[in-house]
Image: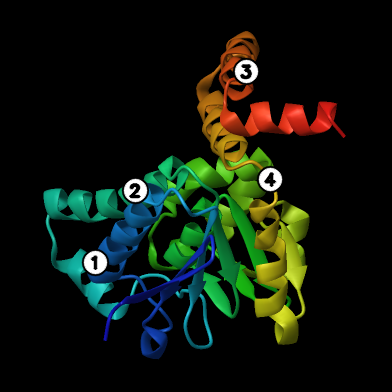
């Protein structure tokens, strides 16, 4: 059985984590296949958005037992390479040109919560559960902290990373970690409704917006404004913008 399932519906690319018997726990094969699928989506000019979801009752429960066993038996270099594999996944999500959305039902814990946090947008069923419980076994949610720190306040990030508690979807939304909470019985339909907006807006403008938003992370205010000038200029020259202006002027 493949660790992931991919499906294309019009301009939406669905990636389903497919280890339901393991609560979609992360292992090397799943991470590698997920990266391959994201690279595939990035090359497809017909796509507008990527949606990552989980098969079965949970989104992703973090690392599986075999992965934890591997950690306990590996030396420093082996553990570094293993951690870097997950880092590469988180980085790749931001490098994919189009939006990558996590559709979370059930539990998203540890690395699974990290995966959701790494996505551009997060939608959750009202029954979903989140948490970074790594500290309970002497571990650190280390790579995801770079993203967590950009999503919530410093004080909130400190509590989430060092206390290891679970929290529900409405709480996650109040923290600023997720965008929308939907009733579980209508979750799939509401997710499709939400992502369908990307069929109605300019693909090139969304690509430029995503790239600029993340480039600004390391910039000063003035540098960010200057980069905004560059991107604004590029956007004006795209076919989408030229067509949009023409339609507006000739209503």
Residue behind mark 4: 201
Q: Which residue is found at the position 63% from the left and 20% from the top?
A: 236
> Of discs 2 and 3, which sits in the foreground?
3
* Between marks 2 and 4 in the image, the one whose residue lies nearer the viewer: 4
Q: Is disc 3 surrounded by few (<14), some (14 to 19) or many (20+) residues within 10 Å?
A: some
Question: Residue furthest toward the front?
Answer: 250
Lower sequence index among marks 2 and 4: 2
Where residue 207 appears, as percent x and y from the top left, is: 54, 38
In the picture shown, does residue 18 fall above or below 92? below
Nearest the eye: 63 or 24: 24
Q: CA separation, marks 4 and 1?
A: 36 Å
Q: 225 left or right of 132? A: right
Residue 92 — which label? Answer: none
Circle 1 residues within 10 Å: few <14, some 14–19, many ≥20: some
**Residue occupied by mark 1:** 28
Mark 2 vs mark 3: which is more N-terminal?
2
**Quarter holding the C terminus?**
top right
Q: Are marks 2 and 4 in contact (CB under 8 Å)?
A: no
Picture residue at 70% right of the left edge, 51% below the top: 200
Say which element carries label 4.
Answer: loop
Task: Identify the mark nearer the N-term, 1 or 3.
Answer: 1
Q: Quadrant of residue 121?
A: bottom right
- The first of marks 4 and 3 along the sequence is 4
Dividing the picture into quarters, in which one does residue 238 lie?
top right
Foreground disc of the pair 1, 3: 3
Q: Position of residue 243 (x, y in %)?
A: 67, 32
Give the residue number, with chain letter if any, for mark 2: 87
Secondary structure of the residue carrying tag 3 is helix
According to the picture, the residue beneath numbered tag 3 turns out to be 228
């Amino acid at each position: 059985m493949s660790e992931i399932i991919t499906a294309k519906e019009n301009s939406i690319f669905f990636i389903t984590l497919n280890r339901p018997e393991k609560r979609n726990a992360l292992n090397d094969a799943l991470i590698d296949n997920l990266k391959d699928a994201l690279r595939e989506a990035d090359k497809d000019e017909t796509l507008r958005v990527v949606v990552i979801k989980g098969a079965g009752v949970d989104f992703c429960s973090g690392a599986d037992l075999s992965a934890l066993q591997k950690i306990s038996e590996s030396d420093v270099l082996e553990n570094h390479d293993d951690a870097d594999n997950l880092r590469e996944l988180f980085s790749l999500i931001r490098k994919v040109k189009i939006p990558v959305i996590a559709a979370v039902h059930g539990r998203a814990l540890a690395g699974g919560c990290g995966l959701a946090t790494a996505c551009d947008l997060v939608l959750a069923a009202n029954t979903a559960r989140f948490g970074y419980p790594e500290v309970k076994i002497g571990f650190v949610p280390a790579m995801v902290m770079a993203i967590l720190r950009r999503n919530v306040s410093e004080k909130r990030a400190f509590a989430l990373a060092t206390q290891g508690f679970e929290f529900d979807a409405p709480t996650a939304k109040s923290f600023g970690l997720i965008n929308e909470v939907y009733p579980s019985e209508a979750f799939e339909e509401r997710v499709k409704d939400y992502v369908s907006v990307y069929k109605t807006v300019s693909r090139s403008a969304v690509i430029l917006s995503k790239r600029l938003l993340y480039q600004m992370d390391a910039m000063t205010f003035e540098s960010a404004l200057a980069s905004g000038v560059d991107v604004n200029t590029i956007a004006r020259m795209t076919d989408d913008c030229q067509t949009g202006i023409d339609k507006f002027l000739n209503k």
